[in-house]
Amino acid sequence: MTQEEQVRKELIHRFGDAYRAFGLSKLMGHVVALLLYSPGPVSLDEISKSLKRSKGPVSQIVRRLRDHNLIRKAWITENNRKDYYEIEPAIFENAFRNNLELIKSNTRIASEVKAKFKSNRNKDLETTALRVLEMERFYSLMEKHYEKFLNEWTKERKKIYK
């Protein structure tokens, strides 16, 4: 195995482990890594073959990755009927934004539940009310820092792609 093949294999393996650690599909990490490593668009057949997986699960993962703006369909030629995929140019920012949306959702949940506790004077729910208040403040602070980070990242990304 060449050094290039070893690097590719390790990248795919590590991305699979990283995605699994976040509670996502290991195959999802493998597809992302394969497309990150590939200099050009890759067909669904080539993805399946490279990862030694059947086309069905790969197709489902590709669809999920597209839905989250991490990869995109690529146009190859008019005569080619196969679907090709490549990494979205802003894949890391998009992944971060997906996470930010989850955080915003958690903030909304906490705010809605907290509002229901205001009208409820049940002493048995005081501990729960405090936990929900903590949740709301925690996720609100995360939102603030995520937004600040995105502003900084926008400036940094411009430096990369001058």
Image (cartoon, rainbow, N blue to C red):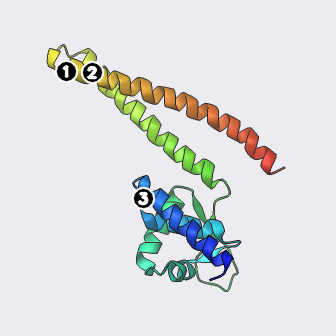
**Marks 1/3: CA–CA distance:** 35 Å
| Residue for badge 3 | 20
Image side of residue 21 versus residue 129, left or right = right
Seen in the image, is 83 located left or right of residue 130?
A: right
Q: Amino acid type of disc 3?
A: Arg
- Say which residue label 1 marks: 125
Question: Which mark identifies residue 113?
Answer: none
Q: Residues within 10 Å of mark 2 (few under 14, many from 20)?
A: many
The answer to whether residue 86 shows anywhere in this view is no
Instruction: Say what amino acid the circle numbered 1 marks.
Output: Leu
> Where is residue 47 shown, x and y percent of the image?
54, 77
Residue at image mark 2 = 129
Q: Position of residue 101 (x, y in %)?
A: 49, 41
**Residue at disc 1, secondary structure:** helix
Q: Quadrant of the N terminus?
A: bottom right
Quarter of the rendering containing residue 44: bottom right
- At mark 2, the secondary structure is helix
Q: Earlier in the sequence, mark 2 or mark 3?
A: 3
Which residue occupies the foreground of this view, 150 or 33? 33
> Relative to residue 93, is residue 120 depicted above or below?
above
From the viewer's perspective, is the residue at label 1 or at label 3 nearer? 3
Earlier in the chain: of badge 1 and badge 3, it is: 3
Graded by Cα atoms within 10 Å as few (under 14), some (14 to 19) or many (20 or more), the crowding at tag 3 reads some
Q: Are marks 1 and 2 in contact (CB under 8 Å)?
A: yes
